[in-house]
Amino acid sequence: MPVIRHAESRRTETPNAVMTTLASPTLGGAEQAVWRVDMQPDATGPLHTFDAEQVWTVVRGGATVELDGEKLTVVAGDTVVMPAAAPRRVSADPEQGFAAIVASRPGANASAPDGTGKTVPAWTV
């Protein structure tokens, strides 16, 4: 399917963000998973890893990204390449919040940095 209509996108809410799946194998056979992350001001995600590279492009607001022990500040227009297995945590700007478009291999596993709690997030399939 060459066009995935907005009405077909899948929305998944977590305690820290809303993920909207824009393209994935279950939305028409894409070989990549693409989703939007929206975080409210001052929201912080958990420290975790993925077993696949992710590319995050900030489209609104800003965030602090803890990536493999380094703290990075990103704003709209910046792109962060998150290598597979690198521990990461995203904290939204306390005043503006944060939104990004993310691309990765579909069906990648997320887990705690120690490898426990392995799961495939719904927005990646």
Image: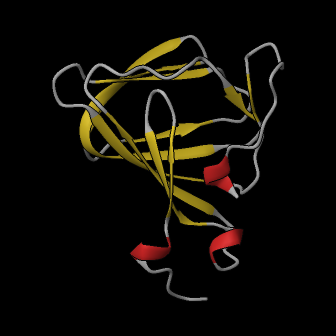
- Residue 104 seen from this side: no
Residue 47 picture location, percent across and down: 60, 17
The residue drawn where x is 73% and y is 19% is 112
Which quarter of the rendered picture does the N terminus lie within? Answer: bottom right
Asked if residue 83 is positioned above or below residue 4 in the image, the reply reads above
User: In the image, 50: left or right of 66?
Assistant: right
Q: Residue lying farthest bottom?
A: 2
**On the image, which quarter does residue 120 sit in?**
top right
**Residue drawn where x is 60% and y is 44% of the image:** 54
Q: Position of residue 26 (x, y in %)?
A: 69, 70
- Tell me, what colour scheme is on the image? secondary structure
Q: Which residue is painted at 83% across and 18% down in the image?
A: 116
Q: Nearer the viewer, residue 87 or 112?
A: 112
Q: Is residue 11 left or right of residue 54?
A: left
Residue 121 pos. (x, y %) = 68, 43
Quarter-of-image position of residue 58:
top left
Quadrant, the C terminus:
bottom right
Q: Is residue 105 visible?
A: yes
Residue sitting at the far left: 95
Residue at the spot 65% in from the left edge and 53% down from the top edge: 124
So how many labels did they put on this image?
0
Residue 53 picture location, percent across and down = 67, 43
